Image (cartoon, rainbow, N blue to C red):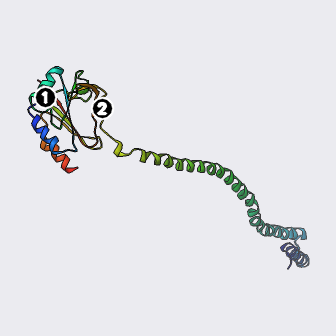
Amino acid sequence: MRSPTRRAAAAAFALSLAATSCTATSPDTVVASIVGQAMEETPETVVESPPTTVPIQAAPDSESARETAKIAGAEPVAVEPAGSEQAEAEPVETQPESPAASPAEVTIRLPDVSVVDLSTGEAVDLGEFVRPGPTLVWFWAPH
Amino acid sequence: MAEGPAVAQLAQDNPDLNVLGLGAQDSLEFANDFVARVGLADSAITFVWDRSFDSWRELGVRSQPYWILYDALGNEVTSSPGAVDAAAVQAVLDAA
């Protein structure tokens, strides 16, 4: 299969022969116009190469994009494990606290005041009268 | 102190209820005489007397009589000035 350039050249040669023999037109002019057409057609065939070139040129872009993605992705990867470790650490810290706060150990808080136990006459801290179970504190005065 | 017998009855009917009679004002001698006179010395109520009045002050008690009911977990269930409402206390204990 002949190339378009060679076809154009052959056509130009044939036309130049015909023009020389049949008309009075200058062969240079005809050849120039034919060659010009051939030159104009040439870019059409050349145009096909850019599509093949574009992917080649795009490859470095995609590679660089991948490299950029790797670089950009490295930071989140480094952060994510740190964040996940913290997320795992928090529940571990809170879980032991829950059993420690046993409701059974909760008792009423009476003021840290020395009072007189009327059954014995001795001074006793008010907190020592706290007992398990419900408590009714009745405030009274002698008068 | 007129509600004394009712409180003593409440304590007797509910052995698991810790009833603490926290007195203040006047004098220790007056407090001892008073408890003996109303016949509550041998009751299930634990009687103590605070000379300083600090316990009342810290608990926000500004008048007497006054009462506070705590549940078994130490949470204040209810409190009120005036005589102890034995029926209300009993209702809370029955509901627990």
Q: Residues within 10 Å of mark 1 (few under 14, many from 20)?
A: some
- Percent across and percent down for residue A27 are 90, 71
Residue beneath disc 2: A127
Instruction: From the viewer's side, name the closer residue of A74 and B92.
Output: B92
Q: Quadrant of residue B62?
A: top left
User: Between tags 2 and 1, which lies in front?
Assistant: 1
Q: Quadrant of the N terminus of chain A?
A: bottom right
The percent coordinates of residue A112 (x first, y second) are 31, 28
Crowding near the residue tagged with mark 2, few <14, some 14–19, many ≥20 C-alpha atoms within 10 Å: some
Q: Residue B47 got which mark? A: none
Query: What is the chain letter for disc 1?
Result: B
Residue B41 horizontal side relative to residue A11, left or right: left
Q: Secondary structure at mark 2?
A: helix
Give the residue number, with chain letter if any, for mark 1: B35
Please say if B11 is above or below A68: above
Q: Secondary structure at mark 1?
A: helix
Residue at 30% across, 43% down: B73
- Under mark 2, the amino acid is Gly
The chain holding disc 2 is A
- The amino acid at mark 1 is Val
